[in-house]
Amino acid sequence: MTNLDREIQTMLRERAQDIQVLPAFLASFDGGDVANSRGTRGWEPRRRTGWLVAAVVVAVLALAGTVIAIRASRHPVAPGTHTPAPTPSSSPFTMTYHVAGVELSDISCATAADCVAVGLDDHQNGVAYSFDGHSWKRAFSLKHGSGGLVVSCAASGGCVAVAGDVAEWRPTANSPWQQVTFPALSRGLVLQIADIKCLTIQSCLAVGTYASGSGNAPLRSPVAYRWDGHAWARTPNPPVAASSQLGLVTVSCWAINACRATATNLKTAELLEWDGTSWSVDATPSFSSTFLGGIQCQTQENCVVLGAVRGRGLGVGSEVLAGGKWTWHPFTDPAIDAQGSVSCVHANDCVYVTTNPRGTADVQVWNGSGWSRGTAVEPLFPNPTTTANPGPPTRYYGPISCVVTGQCFFVGWEQGSNGDTSFVESSR
Amino acid sequence: MDVAELARERGLELLRFAYLLCGDRQRSEDLLQDVLLAMYRRFPGDITIENPVGYARRSLVNANVSRARRSASTEVLVPEFTDGADLSGGDPGDREVLWHSLRHLPPRQRAVLVLRFYVDASDEEIATILGCRRGTIRSLASRALAAMRADPALALDNAEGAS
């Protein structure tokens, strides 16, 4: 054992002593109460913390009743390779691509024949793949320290992908990618872009958080940058109290210089509006949610905001703005995980995909008036769980990007015998 | 043993394990809660596997990796290091630096170190828990230790030797 090994061992054993007592809600676990899943005696309502809880999503799309299925491959690919998968004969969705050694984290499609998927490879470098309607190819790779990658493509095919504080962009679908950095923050501050939306390649808004401090409670502040096709410019600070620890999580724009963004910390949520000049707190809604996640606004009067409520029995669902009025629409199945991804073609047409505890996907669709249920996605690989190797399979589904009704792409990954494999599913 | 008994009798041990995996007290409680819930759904009566703690550990590792990936675009772990901390003296303050460096590792690399140095699991056991090959464990551990050695905040002697 080296000196470092010993130090790590000592540190871990000391750190473990930080936890001296098992919280009552865990010590009083009662299976009968858990069966109800939420808000019952002896079992605290599922306390998803802030972002974790909330990545909730609205979903909608006229795919109700359709079956989403991923073709089960029996031939895992070797790490570092990528191979187009065969197309199943009967399914509205099909796997268009899988790649080993990469964890795809986001996807954006300008059209059904022009998508970009981004993620991290085994070396924690950012990678991007582009789709031309027929095949996927590697678009770029960049060094990346922490956090995930996000991407947004405008209808013209121009795209911007952000990894931490570095971005790659292309003016059109056929032009090369170029790297551009964000303006430097003060020393000690860490920028993490959480979401980006491009209406055109000259009009993007990236939102996120910059953080300072350390430990379990870094100081977080919301931050946003505009991209005009040439450079990033930081927007004025969103009007939230510095002590609120709010960070911007997601953004949606319905017109140039007309966007809404969600901000959240571990306890509260805010909806902010950007008019091209300044941010304001949207005072209109009286949200039920203690967390706001994904947002999709088609117009100023039509938005769907994913939300989560803790401790008040409403669970997970969406805040929907229609006709100037916000209403809460919970998912019909309270057991559905709130950490999935949603994409809307318009206000009455969205799809939500999330991973359930069995490692398959839950799909929810929204038609403008309520949620309905899609069908579980089949695994890419055989279930790795065996007697000798127990445990739930590790799979993850989403994010999703829908281009028109019935045409969506989503990314995911799962653990196969040869390591992680990411995949892209698309509807036909 | 059912899941409720597992929570009562081994809950603290599992919570500590979850805390070391994710580096955050509140998140570790959420992780354990999710895992117990998932286990109850799978085993509503007695847990019918030989090693429920091992099962729970694996579930915690998987859940933490999944959460890290899902939240990677919304959460920031902020490294704040004093310049040139020297660990050779084993000072508690230095271990604080080490803790932050560990928290900055990718979740699977961190899980390997926690399993190896806290749980004292063999590489074979870790491979079983993570559901990958033994060689992958060695690779993950090697990468994790290399990353920590390369961390300027730790100012370690690179000649110390790799694991």
Image (tube, coloured by chain):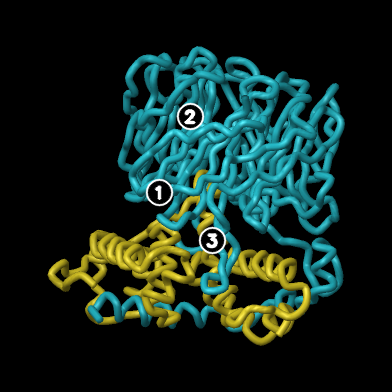
Chain colours: A cyan, B yellow
Q: Amino acid at mark 2?
A: Tyr
Image position of B30 with respect to B17: above or below: above
- Foreground mark, 2 or 3, reads 3
Label at residue A305: none
Q: Are marks 1 and 2 in contact (CB under 8 Å)?
A: no
Vertical placement of residue A397 versus A30, above or below: above
Q: Which residue is mark 1?
A: A146
Give whichever of discs 2 and 3 has the lower sequence position: 2
Instruction: Name the residue at 48% across, 38% down.
Output: A193
SS at badge 3 = loop
* Above-or-below relation of A185 to A109: below
Which chain is mark 3 on?
A
Quadrant of residue B125 within the rendered picture = bottom left
The quadrant in which the N terminus of chain B is found is: bottom right
Q: Amino acid at mark 1?
A: Ser
In the figure, residue A99 lies in which quadrant?
top left
Give the secondary structure at mark 2.
strand
Q: Which residue is mark 3?
A: A384
- Comes first in the chain, label 1 or label 2: 1
Q: Nearer the viewer, residue A313 or B123?
A: B123
Q: Which residue is mark 2?
A: A225
